[in-house]
Image (tube, grey):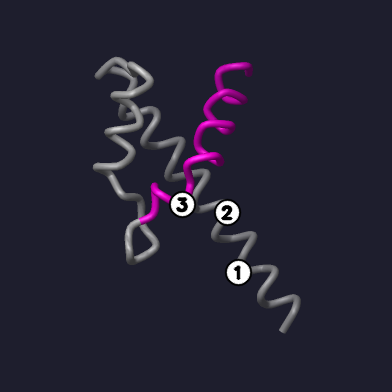
Amino acid sequence: MQENVRFCDVLLSTLPVLRDGFGGIAGANLGALMDAYGVPAGQRPVIMGKAAAMMRGIDQVREAEKTRNG
């Protein structure tokens, strides 16, 4: 879906500021990003879920690469 392509572009371009010091999602930063893009309150839980899923996927790929590369 075009909506998901746009979401992925934004998420990947801002990923460094969306991580907290423990590898989780920096909710305040994601909230600020949603404010900047004018995301309506009703869509924010959906965006948070998408962001969490993408970050988990990125983490899984990184872990698999570490394992593979020894």
Relative side of 34 to 54, left or right: left
Q: Amino acid at mark 3?
A: Pro
> Is residue 38 toward the left or the right of residue 63 in the image?
left
Q: Amino acid at mark 2?
A: Ile
**Residue 38 to residue 19: above or below:** above
How far across and down, in percent of the image, does residue 20 sit? 33, 58
- Which residue does the image show at 40% across and 49% down from the upper left? 17
Kind of residue sitting beneath label 1? Glu
Percent from the top left, x then y, of residue 18? 39, 47
Residue indicated by mark 3: 16
Q: Earlier in the sequence, mark 2 or mark 1?
A: 2
Residue 58 is tagged as: 2
| Residues at circles 2 and 3 in contact by the CB criterion of under 8 Å | no
First-in-chain label (1 vs 3): 3
Q: Quadrant of the N terminus?
A: top right
Instruction: Tell me where the magenta segment starts and ends, as one range.
Output: 1-19
Q: Looking at the rendered structure, which numbered label has been put on residue 63?
A: 1
Q: Secondary structure at mark 2?
A: helix
Q: Is residue 41 positioned above or below 20 on the image?
A: above
Q: Residue at x 38, y 20 (%)?
A: 37
Q: Main secondary structure of the magenta part?
A: helix
- Residue 65, percent across and down? 70, 69
Marks 2 and 3, how far apart at CA? 12 Å
